Amino acid sequence: MARKYNIQVAFIAIIVVVLLYFKQTKIKGFLIKNLYSGTPKTARTQRFPAIISNLVSEKEWEKISCVPFKVDRNISTPICIYNLTEGDNLSKVLSRGTVWQPHLIKTIQILKRDPELQLIDLGANLGTWTLSAARLGRKVLAAEMFPPTVIRLRKSIQLGNLQDLVTLVPKPLSDTRENVTIYLCRKSKMAINILMRKCSSPSPYVASTITMDDLTAYLPNGFTKAFMKIDIEGMELRVFNRSDHFLKTVDVPVILMEWRFYIRATLEPKCSYFISFMSRMDYIPFRHLAGPAGKLGPLLEDTHWLHITDLYLIKKTYLKSNFAHLQ
């Protein structure tokens, strides 16, 4: 009898140890590579943010899968993704534990060199840039317009305990305030825009646009200097049409923007106007940051403009003090 009792006690002890081990995992109460912790239902319920209750039910919130995202050699954070059956390329890459973009690695290096630099992430998507900067302890102003992606990003922020560092604006950006339909291009959740194209089909989502100047109202306290990443599927130039106030309020020494939509539009006035505007703001254009050869010449003379997909804009004063290798 005593032996049977001892076996039962030992069995119970093993179960307790296992549950305690799972409870101490970094991502508590959520799916981690098919591993689920023993966090009570009541504790999980408290994590469901009321702010998105109009977008998703608690049941659907719980179903969203999240995986570890390695920000740096010794730093990781949870990132929530789409089911792989939904065909989202970024989610597929993240599920394999791969760093998504070389530009992101470069940006992390820039942030590390300048402890005053925060991040503005316009077109945040699932949040690889937003979460990386926040995990490094930097404040982030992020804008993402697609509701299903906003839900996943909010969950990532919450699981990583980054709420105090990230301000998320769930709005599309433009140069006017209007109601727009959000379009999906193919199945990819990265190819989302408010410009109707042949490859696009309307989603059930309608949203109200805001301007970059409107983002000034969302700035966190002490947010005075930041690296800006802007990737909003062909709306970049229009957004900068209403950016004067914002760029005068926040010192943005480095801008990285998607340029692939403008490769065939370099002769159009909108491109010339944009480059002239940025020149007046003391920005110098670069196609890469590997060395002086990355500096771009005049828009209508330098043929490199016809081949770049991403454009760096760096303020002259910041270039001298932080990018000596580019001069």
Image (cartoon, rainbow, N blue to C red):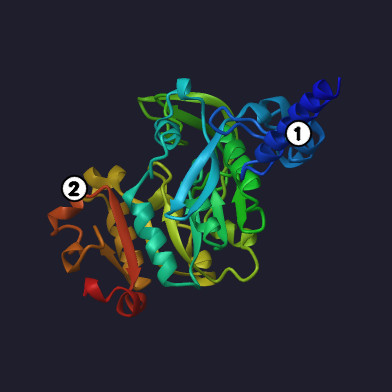
Q: Residue at x 47, y 36 (%)?
A: 194
Q: Is residue 114 above or below residue 44?
A: below
**Kind of residue sitting beneath label 1:** Ala
Within-10-Å neighbours for mark 2: few <14, some 14–19, many 20+: few
Camera-near label (1 vs 2) is 1
Q: Residue at x 46, y 32 (%)?
A: 189
Q: Is residue 287 above or below residue 208?
A: below
Does residue 161 appear left or right of residue 33 in this picture?
right
Of 270 and 284, which appears nearest the observer?
284
Does residue 100 appear left or right of residue 22 in this picture?
left
Of 74 and 125, which appears nearest the observer?
74
Residue 134: percent from left, percent from top: 55, 57
Q: Residue at x 43, y 44 (%)?
A: 232
Give the numbered dot on residue 271: none
**Which residue is labeled 2 in the image?**
307
Quadrant into which the C terminus falls: bottom left
Does the image show residue 244? yes
The secondary element bearing badge 1 is classed as helix
Q: Residue furthest front?
A: 2
**Which residue is labeled 1 in the image?**
13
Does residue 120 appear left or right of residue 327 in this picture?
right
Within-10-Å neighbours for mark 1: few <14, some 14–19, many 20+: few
Of 127 and 143, which appears nearest the observer?
127
Q: Quadrant of residue 61?
A: top right
**Kind of residue sitting beneath label 2:** His
Quadrant into which the N terminus falls: top right
Residue 62: percent from left, percent from top: 67, 29
Does the image show residue 144? no
Q: Quick one: label 1 or label 2, which is nearer the N terminus?
A: 1
Cα gap from disc 1 to disc 2, whole angstroms: 64 Å
Residue 202: percent from left, percent from top: 49, 24
